[in-house]
Image (tube, rainbow, N blue to C red):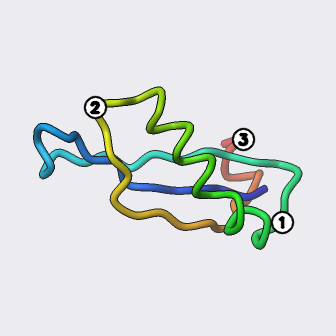
Amino acid sequence: MIELAFVACLVTVPDHCENRSMLFTDITPMQCAMGAQPELAKWVGSHASWRVREWRCAMRDKTALDA
């Protein structure tokens, strides 16, 4: 499982940031890295008051999600 983890900050209060993530089950880390920007652009498109400050792709242990 691949996690696209990112930090989103409010446009009006740039110091107010939250950790967010998207999980993908059928892609590789390279596919995540190559496809992250379009996915994040879609997210920002539906969350107009937020901006993405930083992002990363990482392997996620499925057993940790089940706990």
Q: Is residue 19 above or below residue 29?
A: above
**Residue 33: image x %, image y %?**
67, 68
Residue at the disc numbered 1: 28
Residue at the disc numbered 3: 66
Q: Earlier in the sequence, mark 1 or mark 3?
A: 1
Q: Nearer the viewer, mark 2 or mark 3?
A: 2
- The answer to whether residue 19 is left or right of residue 59 is left
Residue at the disc numbered 2: 49
Toward the viewer: 20 or 34? 34
Q: Earlier in the sequence, mark 2 or mark 1?
A: 1
Toward the viewer: 57 or 38? 38
Q: Residues within 10 Å of mark 2 (few under 14, many from 20)?
A: few
**Residue 64: image x %, image y %?**
67, 52
- Among all residues in the image, which is located at the extreme top? 46
Q: Earlier in the sequence, mark 2 or mark 3?
A: 2
Q: CA distance from mark 2 to mark 3?
A: 32 Å
Amino acid carrying label 3: it is Asp
